[in-house]
Image (cartoon, rainbow, N blue to C red):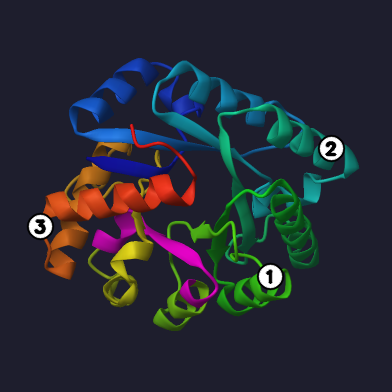
């Protein structure tokens, strides 16, 4: 059994064959998918993500304002997000939220403010958080500490791209760490070093599809069925059977998001 702990199958890349994508995931042994809604918080993207989760058994949703879109966050967006968190049983987390200093699509001070505000919203809603952090290790950890993130509700550092030091810091705060297909890339030795030190009980796997297809599928559109290849790579890296890694990471997922295993 496997779980794709972070996917974007509501995107237009899957409009032509979404049913088949979900069917292939099932055939590959992927029993649950967390579909993460991102985009303009005023543009219906959150509702689209929830609709996909409502359509397919074993698919759940998370919604939140990505750091790329932080400049679009306003009081109306905050109210809409709060209403959705309260009204939809398919939402199991707030995210993805955080900091992205690689692209800087939103000003950094705005990113930091919107990140902190959403962490407070998640704490009020008693939901785990899904964290995006790119080239912002120190400030991400600082804000998580300042906002007392992790704690009782926990969360996940998705598509982890930081250092061993960052991984150990967020684990200490109560976070899980999730690895995507980029951990299989030839030049990703830093990620592999982090993947070796994450305790099994805090490890998750994901696709972040349609991006980051793992080796040997690199160059193709990624999809949830491909999470098995990332799991296979991590099982070899950690020296444990693939079935055991699948079982443990699936159990971690259901426990973190307070879900009944499916």
The residue stretch that appears in magenta: 171-184
| Residue 101, horizontal then vertical, whole percent | 62, 67
Label 2 sits on a secondary structure element that is: helix
Residue 113 lies in quadrant:
bottom right
Q: Earlier in the sequence, mark 1 or mark 2?
A: 2
Question: Where residue 241 is drawn, which disc sits there?
Answer: 3
Label 1 vs label 2, nearer the camera: 1
Asked if 244 appears above or below 167 in the picture, the reply is above
Q: Nearer the viewer, residue 106 or 61?
A: 61
The quarter in which the C terminus is drawn is top left
| Residue 240, horizontal then vertical, whole percent | 12, 63
Neighbor class of circle 3 (other Cα within 10 Å; few <14, some 14-19, many 20+) is some
| Residue 189, horizontal then vertical, whole percent | 27, 75
Neighbor class of circle 2 (other Cα within 10 Å; few <14, some 14-19, many 20+) is few
Label 1 sits on a secondary structure element that is: loop
Asked if 108 appears above or below 153 in the picture, the reply is below
Q: Residue at x 65, y 38 (%)?
A: 39
Q: From this viewpoint, is residue 208 visible?
A: no
């Amino acid at each position: 059994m496997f779980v794709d702990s972070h996917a974007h199958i509501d995107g237009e890349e899957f409009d032509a064959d979404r049913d088949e994508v979900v069917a292939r995931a099932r055939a590959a042994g992927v029993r649950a998918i967390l579909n993460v809604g991102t985009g303009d918080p005023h543009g219906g993207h959150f509702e689209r993500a929830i609709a996909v989760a409502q359509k397919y058994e074993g698919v759940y949703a998370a919604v939140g304002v990505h750091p790329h879109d932080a400049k679009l966050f306003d009081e109306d967006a905050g109210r809409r997000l709060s209403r959705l968190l309260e009204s939809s049983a398919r939402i199991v987390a707030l995210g993805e939220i955080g900091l992205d200093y690689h692209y800087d699509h939103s000003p950094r001070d705005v990113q930091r403010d919107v990140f902190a505000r959403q962490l407070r919203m998640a704490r009020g809603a008693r939901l785990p958080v899904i964290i995006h952090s790119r080239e912002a290790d120190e400030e991400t950890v600082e804000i998580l500490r300042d906002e007392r993130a992790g704690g009782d509700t926990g969360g996940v550092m998705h598509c982890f791209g930081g250092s061993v030091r960052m991984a150990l810091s967020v684990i200490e705060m109560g976070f899980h760490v999730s690895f995507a297909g980029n951990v299989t890339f030839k030049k990703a030795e830093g990620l592999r070093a982090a993947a070796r030190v994450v305790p099994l009980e805090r490890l998750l796997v994901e696709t972040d599809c349609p991006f980051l297809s793992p080796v040997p599928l690199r160059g193709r559109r990624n999809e949830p069925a491909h999470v098995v290849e990332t799991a296979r790579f991590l099982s070899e890296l950690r020296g444990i059977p693939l079935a055991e890694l699948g079982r443990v990471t699936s159990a971690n997922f259901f426990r973190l998001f307070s879900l009944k295993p499916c």
